[in-house]
Image (cartoon, rainbow, N blue to C red):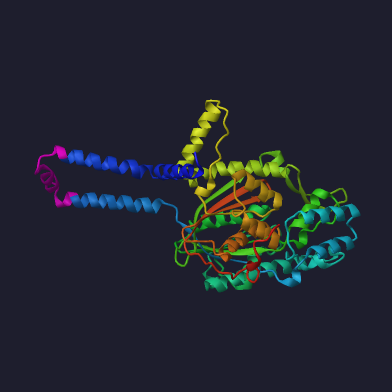
Amino acid sequence: MSPSIDMCLKIVYEKIVDNFLLVVAVPLTIAAATTAMARLKPNESTDRIQSFSHPQILSILLFLAIAVIAYYMQRPRMVYLVDYACFRTTYNYRVPYAAFVEHVRQVSHFSERSVRFLTRLLERSGLGEETCLPTVSQYIKPYKYCTLEAAREEAQLVVFSAIDDLFAKTNISPLAIDILVVNCGFSPTPGFPDMIMNKYKMRSDIRNVHLSGMGCSAGLASVDLAKNLLQATPRGARALVVSTETLTPNYYFGNERAMLLPYCLFRMGGAAVLLSTSPAKARFRLKYVVRTHTAADDKSYQCIYQKEDDMGNKGVDLSTDLMAVAARTLKANITTIAPLVLPASEKLLFAMSFVSTKLLRMRTKLYVPNFLTAFEHICIHAGGRAVIDEIQRSLGLSDEHVESSRMTLHRFGNISSSCLWYELAYIEAKRHMQKGDRVWMIGFGSGFKCNSAVWECIVPQNSEDGPWARCIHRYPVRT
C-alpha cells in the first residue's frame, strides 16, 4: 500500500472514530424520531403537545434550568494564564565556553582530572556561548564570595526583573494580587514571598507559599498549587507564580564527578506567571495538571541527592540511574495523562494493541500512542541533551517538536524550574503559536518527580519581545 493511500485511510479512520458519537448517534436519533412520528395518527402528535398545560411546561423548563445551573456550579473553576515574563540575562553575566574553561583551570580547588572532565562535559552539553552565571562565578576563589548577601542579590536580580516585566506587560497593580506562590531551593529568612511582598508593597491578606527542595519540577507544582488556591477563592482572583533557582549558595567545591555535573550545566534564569479564574485578557487556558511522584522507590529517591563528599563539601550527586528513573517516571505520568488528552482513535489503537500483545500473546510490539494528535507544541524540561534525546526517542518526536527545548538549553542552559516558560516564549517568538493550539509541558525534578501541564492557546502573542529579543533571528542552530 502506498504511503499516500495509507495516510488517507488513517485520516478517515481518525475522523470516524474521533467523531463516533456524531457519526452514529445523530442518524440513530433521527431514525428513531422518524419511526415514532410515523406510528402516530395524523393529529395525534399535535394533540399530545397541546395536552401539556402551561404550569407543566414551566415546571419542566425550571427543572432543566436548575439542573444546568447545578452542573456548572459543581464544576471546578477554569484557570487561565493571563501572561508570563522571563528574566532577560545581560552580557555582563555571560560565560562563553573559553571563559568557563579558563576559569575552572584557575580555580585552585579543582584537580587536573576535574578540569578535563568539566571541559569534555561542556563540549557535549549542548550549551552555547551566551549562557549566564552569577557574579560569584567570576572569582578565582568563589568560596570566599558565596555569602548570604550575594545569594540574596542574585535572587532579587532575577526575580524582580521578571516580575517587573510581567506587571508592565499586564498593566496589573501589585495590590491586585491575591495569591503568591514562589518556588526556589534557596530559602532565606525572611522568605522569598516576604521579599517580594516588601518590594512591591502587596496587601497584608495575600495568601503566600514558598516551595523549596522540589528541584526542576517545582515550576509546574507551583502552577498546580496556585490553581487549587484560585479555585477556593472568589471568582476573578489573581495568582502570581514565581519560579527560579539561586545558584550562589549551591556551588560545589569538591572533585567528585557525579557532583560536578550541576556545576557545568546549571545557569541563571527565572520566570513570573500571572494566573486568574477570570478569562478577561487571558492568553492560555489551563486544561490539565498531572503530577507523578516516585519517592517511595529508593533508586528514585536517591538519583538526585544533596550530600557531602568525603572532604565535607556540599553538593548534589546525580546517580547513574537518573535516565532510567526519569524514563520510568515519565511512563507513569504518560499513563495518567494519556486518557485525558488522546483522541478516541489513538485510545482504540492502543487498546487493540494491548489486547493482542498482552492477552493474546501475539508477537507484536505494543502500540505507542501518537501524542502529536493531542498537542501542537511540546515543551520538555531542558535538563540536558541526554534528557531531550531520550524523550524524543520515547515519544517518536521530530527535531521540530523538540526545537524549543534544544534551543533553550543552547541559549540559556539548564535554568531549572523556569526553563519551560523560556521554551514557550521561543515558540511564540518564532510565531508558531496559533489560536486553539495545545501545549504540553513536561518537567522533571528530584524525588523523583515528573509533572505535566496542558495549556490551550486563546490569544497568541507572536512577539519577539521577551527573553529571545535580539537573538531569535539566529535560531535554530545546530547543537
Q: Quadrant of residue 266?
A: bottom right
| Nearer the observer, 109 or 194 | 109
| Nearer the observer, 422 or 377 | 377
Q: Is residue 40 magenta?
A: yes
Q: Residue 168: where, in percent of width, then height?
A: 56, 74
Against 195, is 330 above or below?
above
Q: Residue 198: where, in percent of width, then height?
A: 63, 71
Q: Residue at x 78, y 53 (%)?
A: 261
Q: Residue at x 72, y 56 (%)?
A: 126
| Nearer the observer, 102 or 295 | 102
Is 49 on the left-hand or right-hand side of 311?
A: left
Name the chief secondary structure element in magenta.
helix
Q: Residue at x 18, y 49 (%)?
A: 56
Quadrant, the C terminus: bottom right
Q: Range of the magenta residues?
A: 38-56
| Nearer the observer, 116 or 48 | 116
Residue 272 in sight in this render = yes
Residue 294 in sight in this render = no
Q: Residue 471: where, in percent of width, then height?
A: 65, 69
Q: Quadrant of residue 430?
A: bottom right
Q: Residue 339: where, in percent of width, then height?
A: 49, 43
The residue sitting at the front extreme is: 2
Q: Residue at x 38, y 53 (%)?
A: 72
Q: Quadrant of residue 409?
A: bottom right
